[in-house]
Amino acid sequence: MPISKPEPTGGELAHRELLRERNELIDAFLKNRAPDFMERHSRLLDDFFRESFENSMAGPTMDMIRNPYAIIALGGYGRQEQCIHSDIDLLFLFKKQVPPAAEELIREVVYPLWDIGFDVGYATRSLKECLQIAGKDYEVLTSLLDARFICGASLLYSDLLENLRKRHLFRQANKIVHWLVDNNDARHRRFGDSSYLLEPNLKEGQGGLRDYHTMLWIGVIKYDFSQPRDLEYQGMLSHSEYRRFRRALEFIWDVRSRLHEMAGRKCDQLHLEFQLKLARAMQFAADEGQKPVERFLGRLHQAMDTIKEQYLMFLRETGAPKRSRAGRRPKKETEVAGLEVHRNALYFVAPEKILKNPVLLIQIFEESARLEIPVSQEGRRLIQEFSHLVDERLRTAPEVVRSFERILMAPAPVFNVLNAMLTTGLLPRLIPGFADIIHRIQYNEYHIYPVDKHSLRTVQTLKRFGTDEDQSGEPLCGQLFKKMKHRRLLMWAALLHDIGKGRPGGEHAKSGARIARKLLAEFGAKPEEADLVSDLVRDHLLLIKVATRRDLNDEETAISCARRIGDIDRLKMIYLLTVADSVATGPKAWNDWTAVLLRELFLKVLSILERGELASQEAVAVVERKRHEILKNSMGETDRAEREALFVAMSPRYLLYMPTEFIDEHLDLFRRLGSRQFVWTIKKANGADTRTVIICGRDRPGLFSKIAGVFTLNGVDILDAQIFTWKNGIALDVFEVKPPPDQLFEDERWHRAEEQLGAALSGELDVSATLAERMQEYRPRRPRIADHPHRVEVDNETSSFFSIVEVITYDFLGLLFSITDTLFRCGLDIWVAKIATRIDQVVDVFYVRDVYGQKVVEAEKVAMIQKAILEVLPDTASEEG
């Protein structure tokens, strides 16, 4: 007889029903048919626990009359914020001691959920234990602040809350609140400001859900909140503020649940790999020059910014935490009629004052900057309510413009007054074009901050030059800024330098220049002042592009910049704006190497503007002076004759740009060469984590590509290369590189690279084949987030002697070898290489000539070079996965 399957038990049926209903609910949510998903998800679990309680075999063995017990939801489950893979936190609470049979109850209720993949955490405690632990461990106490009754003895749940208030919340309120705020501050430092970050943490970062939870916990402790809407009912938020706050929370919860579903687990970090998918799933469309993912991230940043601002204002308005008496500062007073200071914040005396004098809307921020105290929450509400008064006439009124310029020029306080003007909506009222860049995201790893926040950070960065908070690491910036004559105009340029990004299509620097000129004219600036700000906006990328993409040893590079800029003061302003822009962009845009290149270019252009363009006679004099110094250092007649012969063999370009002391070093290196294929020396750079590799060897076709390939095999990234060929067939190549990854074994890595280069030059090592094998094993550590097409441009205008090939592409293993090998196969000699890596994108620049020493100017040859390089670059198809 066939063996029949046993009928499923009641508990098994309950689990199956829970899974079925939960899957149906998740499916409806993903199809946008379950707007109240978290609450319904929580109720499903509630129903399961109640059914398990009713059908428990262990329950009747415990004496509910003498020792009542209850099952209580904690944490996010207690708040009914149950996202798809959120934890399920439970408290099994007993009035007296926990009976042995409680373990069997837990096996019935919790273990089956573990078996089907739910993440359930539980605690089993008596009422006395629970209260004792809560008094010592505030993590436990905060979880109890979210407690919600599910089933069992409801009076026991009431006893828990009543005793919690009497024993702890009333007696230790300030201590607990201080702990909550300090704990949240520490979390912000660890996870960062989520309203800015490229990969924000939806829960733990500043602007994340934990800020909202902290507001609720403080509300329960100090104001006896019973529901989130008490934030509105008890006056902490206005009706419109609460609605905006709630919409921001609902958007983040929506994103968080979808993120859980995509990750297949609980996940709060919005990694790059999910962002494109989320934008598509939430049906964001391209609009106004922005991709769907940029609009999605802009909406997310806006939501997290709302939560951050409301959290900070909640703390200020509720006085949590209050300053101790010893730490209080003298009360500050305002002299502006219609304003007053109360509890170290600025208020309007009455709304009627604004109607009579709308200039107060800007003056309150000027006073905020002067007194270094914030505008109150009530003040912000009134600014938002009366912002419609800032019409064309008012925003261009001279007193308003002067007030705003005083804010621009004020020292940078701890908080950013311009940011407060932005969040209240006053800044875009004053500067209409600013509205187009609010929460505008540029989807790449280079720009960390939204365009509006980046612009304000640029202003703050400028203000801090030469102070203890200077983030540039460049003393030159402080010196120049201190002596700057047109500081006011420089601040305008910093604020407006990216305003053109709000206008899709075209170059943002050019469109921004037009907007800036029009705006300054409206504000009553003199024509020459408007022109200067416009020029600074137009040229704010000039120095950084030239420094990272052009040969700084070529006099024409500096001369071209000097001709474009034309004025010493303007050069200093562009340099300061460039540094501030780079620092404010993020650590990926500003580093030791960028600082060195930019400073070198600035000093060379400054020298030309001060002394005029160098004449050819002066260049001849420089070479002759170096010849004299080199021969003066000779040791006897034989050495002098050898030096004389080598000096004649050196190329004019090498002699003009190489310092004398380096030439001496290179002569010593040449003597070491003997019959070998090459020799090299490696030096550590001062003040930067880079190495200078000087290679002396016999010139041959494809030498650069072989060196690049060997460096790639050993994890050495090339930053800059100067290629010099002497008339006696000697190649003297100078590379600036990043050191190998594991610097503990750096010497061994260089020794291996030296052996491999020797093998490559002798034909024993096929660099191309070895790299191909390595590339098969290579997997990028993270997905590429931008999807721009490759570009290969050939510039025959900048240099009189070289064609400049620019390759804009994405970084991958063997990229530099692939490009340089292609240039070699196209019959081109590389004389200078500049490698600018921007995280996920690189700009490789090569100064080249053909085998006859000529520029490549024929259109067919240019097209052939572009086609050949594009063919070795990887497919640009988006890697959305």
Image (spheres, rainbow, N blue to C red):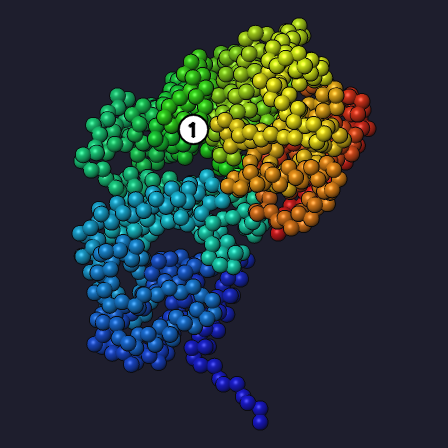
Query: In terms of secondary structure, where does tag 1 sit?
Result: loop
Instruction: Point out the residue furthest to the top here.
Output: 617
Viewer-side residue, 595 vs 788? 595
Q: Which residue is mark 1?
A: 471
Q: Find residue 335 and report its image quarter.
A: top left
The reply, left or right, for residue 343 in relation to residue 558 is left
* Location of residue 427 in the rendering, given as x and y in whole percent from the top left corner: 43, 29
268 up-or-down from 354: above or below: below
The reply, left or right, for residue 562 in relation to residue 120 is right
Instruction: Point out the residue furthest to the bottom here.
Output: 1
624 up-or-down from 581: above or below: above
Q: Find residue 123 and report its image quarter.
A: bottom left
Q: Residues within 10 Å of mark 1 (few under 14, many from 20)?
A: some
Q: Quadrant of the N terminus?
A: bottom right
* Location of residue 305 in the rendering, given as x and y in whole percent from the top left corner: 42, 40
Viewer-side residue, 388 vs 40? 40
Q: Is residue 431 visible?
A: no
204 up-or-down from 368: above or below: below
Amino acid at dot 1 = Gln
* Location of residue 22 in the rendering, given as x and y in whole percent from the top left corner: 48, 66
Q: Residue at x 41, y 35 (%)?
A: 423
Q: Residue at x 45, y 47 (%)?
A: 201
The reply, left or right, for residue 2 in relation to residue 586 is right
